Amino acid sequence: MGTWIAKRKGSYEMNVNVEKIDRGNFPLMKNLSSLASYLAAYHRGIIWASPEFAFAGGENADIGGIIYPISNEFLVEPCNTHVLAIHQKLNELLAEIADLPAEPKTLWQHYRKNPIYIAIMADATMIPMYYYYNPDSDYVSGQGTASDFIYGDIDPDPQDMENDTFTYWPEMENAVGRVTGFDAEDCSALIARTIFYDNIIEKLGEWKRNATVQTGTGIEFQYIPIITPLANRLKSIMGFGPVRQEPTKFPTGESKFINERICNDFAFSIFNP
Protein backbone atom coordinates (compact mmCIF):
# COMPACT_ATOMS: atom_id res chain seq x y z
CA MET A 1 0.00 0.00 0.00
CA GLY A 2 1.46 3.33 -1.02
CA THR A 3 0.70 6.47 0.97
CA TRP A 4 1.49 10.04 -0.09
CA ILE A 5 1.34 12.89 2.38
CA ALA A 6 1.57 15.94 0.10
CA LYS A 7 0.04 14.48 -3.10
CA ARG A 8 -3.17 12.69 -3.99
CA LYS A 9 -1.50 10.42 -6.53
CA GLY A 10 1.87 8.79 -7.03
CA SER A 11 3.63 5.70 -8.28
CA TYR A 12 5.89 3.11 -6.71
CA GLU A 13 7.68 -0.08 -7.61
CA MET A 14 7.70 -3.22 -5.49
CA ASN A 15 9.06 -6.74 -5.48
CA VAL A 16 6.68 -9.33 -4.04
CA ASN A 17 7.65 -12.68 -2.57
CA VAL A 18 4.61 -14.91 -2.14
CA GLU A 19 4.60 -17.62 0.50
CA LYS A 20 1.63 -19.93 0.90
CA ILE A 21 0.38 -20.25 4.47
CA ASP A 22 -2.44 -22.40 5.79
CA ARG A 23 -3.85 -19.79 8.21
CA GLY A 24 -3.63 -16.14 9.18
CA ASN A 25 -3.41 -16.35 12.95
CA PHE A 26 0.21 -17.50 13.14
CA PRO A 27 2.77 -16.02 15.57
CA LEU A 28 5.03 -13.25 14.31
CA MET A 29 7.25 -13.77 17.36
CA LYS A 30 7.93 -17.49 17.37
CA ASN A 31 7.87 -19.85 20.37
CA LEU A 32 7.60 -17.16 23.04
CA SER A 33 5.09 -19.22 25.00
CA SER A 34 7.75 -21.92 25.49
CA LEU A 35 9.29 -19.65 28.14
CA ALA A 36 6.07 -19.10 30.08
CA SER A 37 6.70 -22.04 32.42
CA TYR A 38 10.13 -20.70 33.43
CA LEU A 39 8.80 -17.22 34.13
CA ALA A 40 5.83 -18.59 36.07
CA ALA A 41 8.06 -20.90 38.13
CA TYR A 42 10.43 -18.07 39.04
CA HIS A 43 7.58 -15.84 40.22
CA ARG A 44 5.60 -18.75 41.72
CA GLY A 45 2.67 -18.00 39.47
CA ILE A 46 0.37 -19.89 37.14
CA ILE A 47 0.10 -20.22 33.36
CA TRP A 48 -3.14 -19.50 31.54
CA ALA A 49 -3.00 -20.27 27.84
CA SER A 50 -5.33 -21.12 24.98
CA PRO A 51 -5.07 -21.13 21.16
CA GLU A 52 -8.47 -19.43 21.20
CA PHE A 53 -6.81 -16.20 22.38
CA ALA A 54 -5.40 -15.58 18.88
CA PHE A 55 -7.10 -13.13 16.52
CA ALA A 56 -6.60 -12.40 12.83
CA GLY A 57 -8.80 -11.37 9.94
CA GLY A 58 -9.97 -14.26 7.79
CA GLU A 59 -9.76 -16.60 10.78
CA ASN A 60 -11.76 -14.89 13.51
CA ALA A 61 -13.62 -12.36 11.36
CA ASP A 62 -14.92 -12.78 7.81
CA ILE A 63 -13.40 -9.53 6.61
CA GLY A 64 -11.09 -9.21 3.66
CA GLY A 65 -7.90 -7.20 3.30
CA ILE A 66 -5.01 -6.89 5.72
CA ILE A 67 -5.46 -9.41 8.55
CA TYR A 68 -4.23 -7.15 11.38
CA PRO A 69 -6.57 -4.60 13.08
CA ILE A 70 -3.82 -1.99 13.30
CA SER A 71 -3.94 -1.69 9.49
CA ASN A 72 -7.58 -2.59 8.82
CA GLU A 73 -10.24 -0.37 10.40
CA PHE A 74 -12.95 -2.97 9.77
CA LEU A 75 -11.20 -5.45 12.07
CA VAL A 76 -11.01 -3.13 15.07
CA GLU A 77 -14.54 -3.76 16.36
CA PRO A 78 -14.47 -7.58 16.01
CA CYS A 79 -11.00 -7.64 17.61
CA ASN A 80 -12.23 -5.56 20.55
CA THR A 81 -15.21 -7.89 20.98
CA HIS A 82 -12.78 -10.82 20.96
CA VAL A 83 -10.59 -9.17 23.63
CA LEU A 84 -13.62 -8.44 25.82
CA ALA A 85 -14.44 -12.15 25.79
CA ILE A 86 -10.88 -12.91 26.97
CA HIS A 87 -11.25 -10.20 29.61
CA GLN A 88 -14.41 -11.83 30.95
CA LYS A 89 -12.65 -15.19 31.27
CA LEU A 90 -9.68 -13.45 32.92
CA ASN A 91 -11.98 -11.96 35.55
CA GLU A 92 -13.39 -15.42 36.19
CA LEU A 93 -9.86 -16.75 36.69
CA LEU A 94 -9.02 -13.86 39.02
CA ALA A 95 -12.11 -14.75 41.04
CA GLU A 96 -10.89 -18.34 41.40
CA ILE A 97 -7.43 -17.20 42.47
CA ALA A 98 -8.88 -14.95 45.18
CA ASP A 99 -11.66 -17.44 46.05
CA LEU A 100 -14.28 -14.76 45.38
CA PRO A 101 -17.47 -14.62 43.31
CA ALA A 102 -16.86 -13.51 39.71
CA GLU A 103 -18.61 -10.21 40.28
CA PRO A 104 -16.88 -7.03 39.03
CA LYS A 105 -17.30 -4.88 42.15
CA THR A 106 -16.12 -7.63 44.50
CA LEU A 107 -13.06 -8.29 42.32
CA TRP A 108 -12.37 -4.57 41.98
CA GLN A 109 -12.47 -4.07 45.75
CA HIS A 110 -10.09 -6.99 46.32
CA TYR A 111 -7.48 -6.42 43.61
CA ARG A 112 -7.17 -2.66 44.02
CA LYS A 113 -5.78 -3.45 47.48
CA ASN A 114 -4.10 -6.75 46.55
CA PRO A 115 -2.80 -6.36 42.99
CA ILE A 116 -1.10 -9.20 41.14
CA TYR A 117 1.28 -9.23 38.17
CA ILE A 118 0.13 -10.43 34.76
CA ALA A 119 2.79 -11.20 32.13
CA ILE A 120 1.70 -11.57 28.50
CA MET A 121 4.14 -13.73 26.57
CA ALA A 122 3.01 -13.44 22.96
CA ASP A 123 2.80 -11.05 20.05
CA ALA A 124 -0.35 -9.05 19.35
CA THR A 125 -1.75 -11.76 17.08
CA MET A 126 -1.54 -14.59 19.59
CA ILE A 127 -2.90 -12.37 22.38
CA PRO A 128 -4.48 -9.28 20.80
CA MET A 129 -4.49 -5.79 22.22
CA TYR A 130 -7.60 -3.65 22.72
CA TYR A 131 -7.91 -0.73 20.28
CA TYR A 132 -9.05 2.38 22.10
CA TYR A 133 -10.49 5.33 20.19
CA ASN A 134 -7.91 7.66 18.66
CA PRO A 135 -8.96 10.69 16.55
CA ASP A 136 -5.62 10.50 14.71
CA SER A 137 -6.25 7.01 13.31
CA ASP A 138 -5.27 6.59 9.67
CA TYR A 139 -3.51 4.17 7.34
CA VAL A 140 -0.10 5.70 8.12
CA SER A 141 -0.02 5.70 11.92
CA GLY A 142 -2.52 2.86 12.38
CA GLN A 143 -6.01 2.34 13.75
CA GLY A 144 -6.88 3.36 17.29
CA THR A 145 -4.55 3.17 20.26
CA ALA A 146 -3.54 -0.47 20.75
CA SER A 147 -3.08 -1.25 24.44
CA ASP A 148 -2.84 -4.05 27.01
CA PHE A 149 -4.40 -1.77 29.64
CA ILE A 150 -7.66 -3.71 29.61
CA TYR A 151 -5.98 -6.89 30.90
CA GLY A 152 -5.14 -5.09 34.15
CA ASP A 153 -8.46 -3.25 34.38
CA ILE A 154 -11.10 -5.17 36.36
CA ASP A 155 -14.04 -2.85 35.68
CA PRO A 156 -14.04 -1.15 32.25
CA ASP A 157 -17.34 0.60 31.59
CA PRO A 158 -19.15 -1.37 28.83
CA GLN A 159 -20.89 1.82 27.69
CA ASP A 160 -17.68 3.87 27.62
CA MET A 161 -14.58 1.71 27.30
CA GLU A 162 -12.26 4.68 27.86
CA ASN A 163 -13.54 4.93 31.43
CA ASP A 164 -14.20 2.60 34.36
CA THR A 165 -17.33 1.59 36.23
CA PHE A 166 -16.26 2.18 39.84
CA THR A 167 -13.72 5.02 39.53
CA TYR A 168 -13.87 8.45 37.92
CA TRP A 169 -10.56 7.89 36.10
CA PRO A 170 -9.55 4.57 34.48
CA GLU A 171 -7.33 2.52 36.79
CA MET A 172 -5.35 -0.69 36.41
CA GLU A 173 -6.03 -2.77 39.48
CA ASN A 174 -3.41 -5.33 38.40
CA ALA A 175 -0.02 -4.70 36.78
CA VAL A 176 0.33 -5.93 33.19
CA GLY A 177 3.47 -6.29 31.08
CA ARG A 178 4.01 -7.86 27.65
CA VAL A 179 7.31 -9.76 27.37
CA THR A 180 8.34 -9.79 23.72
CA GLY A 181 11.34 -10.47 21.52
CA PHE A 182 12.22 -11.37 17.94
CA ASP A 183 12.02 -15.04 18.96
CA ALA A 184 12.27 -17.25 22.04
CA GLU A 185 16.05 -16.87 22.23
CA ASP A 186 15.79 -13.10 22.22
CA CYS A 187 13.02 -13.21 24.81
CA SER A 188 15.01 -15.61 27.00
CA ALA A 189 17.90 -13.16 27.18
CA LEU A 190 15.49 -10.39 28.20
CA ILE A 191 13.98 -12.51 30.98
CA ALA A 192 17.43 -13.54 32.26
CA ARG A 193 18.53 -9.92 32.34
CA THR A 194 15.39 -9.03 34.30
CA ILE A 195 15.77 -11.84 36.84
CA PHE A 196 19.46 -11.17 37.43
CA TYR A 197 19.31 -7.39 36.99
CA ASP A 198 20.49 -6.55 40.51
CA ASN A 199 23.50 -8.86 40.12
CA ILE A 200 24.33 -7.38 36.72
CA ILE A 201 24.34 -3.75 37.87
CA GLU A 202 25.84 -4.34 41.33
CA LYS A 203 29.35 -3.33 40.24
CA LEU A 204 28.35 -0.52 37.87
CA GLY A 205 28.81 2.32 40.36
CA GLU A 206 26.71 5.27 41.44
CA TRP A 207 25.94 6.43 37.89
CA LYS A 208 23.06 3.97 37.82
CA ARG A 209 21.19 6.24 40.22
CA ASN A 210 21.16 9.06 37.67
CA ALA A 211 18.20 9.59 35.37
CA THR A 212 17.35 11.99 32.56
CA VAL A 213 13.97 13.33 31.50
CA GLN A 214 13.55 14.73 28.00
CA THR A 215 10.29 15.94 26.51
CA GLY A 216 9.36 17.67 23.27
CA THR A 217 6.96 20.52 22.67
CA GLY A 218 4.27 18.45 20.95
CA ILE A 219 1.89 18.52 23.92
CA GLU A 220 2.10 22.32 23.97
CA PHE A 221 0.90 22.67 20.40
CA GLN A 222 -2.25 20.59 20.18
CA TYR A 223 -4.20 23.72 19.22
CA ILE A 224 -2.53 26.97 18.19
CA PRO A 225 -4.70 30.05 17.64
CA ILE A 226 -4.99 31.08 13.98
CA ILE A 227 -2.54 28.40 12.74
CA THR A 228 -4.58 25.34 13.79
CA PRO A 229 -7.91 26.59 12.31
CA LEU A 230 -6.11 27.29 9.01
CA ALA A 231 -4.50 23.84 9.06
CA ASN A 232 -7.88 22.24 9.78
CA ARG A 233 -9.35 24.06 6.79
CA LEU A 234 -6.54 22.86 4.53
CA LYS A 235 -6.91 19.28 5.77
CA SER A 236 -10.62 19.27 4.96
CA ILE A 237 -9.81 20.50 1.43
CA MET A 238 -7.00 17.98 0.88
CA GLY A 239 -9.09 15.16 2.29
CA PHE A 240 -6.76 13.68 4.90
CA GLY A 241 -5.27 14.31 8.32
CA PRO A 242 -6.90 14.82 11.74
CA VAL A 243 -8.94 17.97 12.34
CA ARG A 244 -8.25 19.06 15.92
CA GLN A 245 -10.86 20.81 18.04
CA GLU A 246 -9.15 20.62 21.41
CA PRO A 247 -8.78 23.35 24.07
CA THR A 248 -5.97 25.82 23.53
CA LYS A 249 -2.83 24.49 25.19
CA PHE A 250 0.20 26.29 23.84
CA PRO A 251 0.50 29.18 26.37
CA THR A 252 0.07 27.02 29.48
CA GLY A 253 3.61 25.71 29.92
CA GLU A 254 2.28 22.18 30.25
CA SER A 255 5.68 20.61 29.53
CA LYS A 256 7.25 22.50 32.44
CA PHE A 257 4.72 21.15 34.93
CA ILE A 258 5.00 17.61 33.59
CA ASN A 259 8.80 17.74 33.84
CA GLU A 260 8.61 19.13 37.38
CA ARG A 261 6.33 16.27 38.42
CA ILE A 262 8.53 13.60 36.78
CA CYS A 263 11.68 15.01 38.42
CA ASN A 264 9.92 15.01 41.78
CA ASP A 265 8.88 11.37 41.34
CA PHE A 266 12.41 10.39 40.31
CA ALA A 267 13.89 12.10 43.35
CA PHE A 268 11.34 10.38 45.60
CA SER A 269 12.53 7.06 44.13
CA ILE A 270 16.16 7.89 45.07
CA PHE A 271 17.27 8.91 41.58
CA ASN A 272 19.26 12.03 40.75
CA PRO A 273 17.34 13.71 37.90
Image: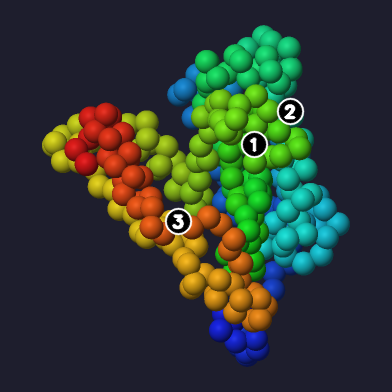
Q: Residue furthest right?
A: 62
Q: Earlier in the sequence, mark 3 or mark 1?
A: 1
Identify the residue at image location x=13%, y=37%.
205
The residues tagged by marks 1 and 2 sit, at their Cα atoms, a distance apart of 20 Å
Which mark, residue 64? none
Q: Is residue 258 above or below residue 247?
A: above
The residues tagged by marks 2 and 3 sit, at their Cα atoms, a distance apart of 41 Å
Q: Earlier in the sequence, mark 2 or mark 3?
A: 2
Which mark, residue 89? 2
Q: Is residue 99 above or below residue 217?
A: above
User: How far across and how far down the image is residue 18, in percent?
Assistant: 69, 74
Report whether 263 appears left or right of 117: left
The residues tagged by marks 3 and 1 sit, at their Cα atoms, a distance apart of 23 Å
User: How far across and how far down the image is residue 235, in percent?
Assistant: 61, 76
Comparing labels 3 and 1, the label whose residue is closer to the camera = 3
Q: Residues within 10 Å of mark 3 (few under 14, many from 20)?
A: some
In front of the other: 101 or 97: 101
Which mark, residue 249? 3
Identify the residue at image location x=37%, y=31%.
195
User: How far across and how far down the image is residue 230, in percent?
Assistant: 55, 76
Q: How is the image coloured?
A: rainbow
Specify the quadrant that holds the C terminus.
top left
Specify the quadrant that holds the N terminus.
bottom right
User: How far across and how far down the image is residue 234, in percent?
Assistant: 59, 79
Residue type at tag 3:
Lys
Q: Secondary structure at mark 1?
A: strand
Identify the residue at image location x=65%, y=48%.
132
Q: Residues within 10 Å of mark 1 (few under 14, many from 20)?
A: some
- Visible in this render: residue 152? no
Residue type at tag 1:
Asn
Report whether 260 appears left or right of 114: left
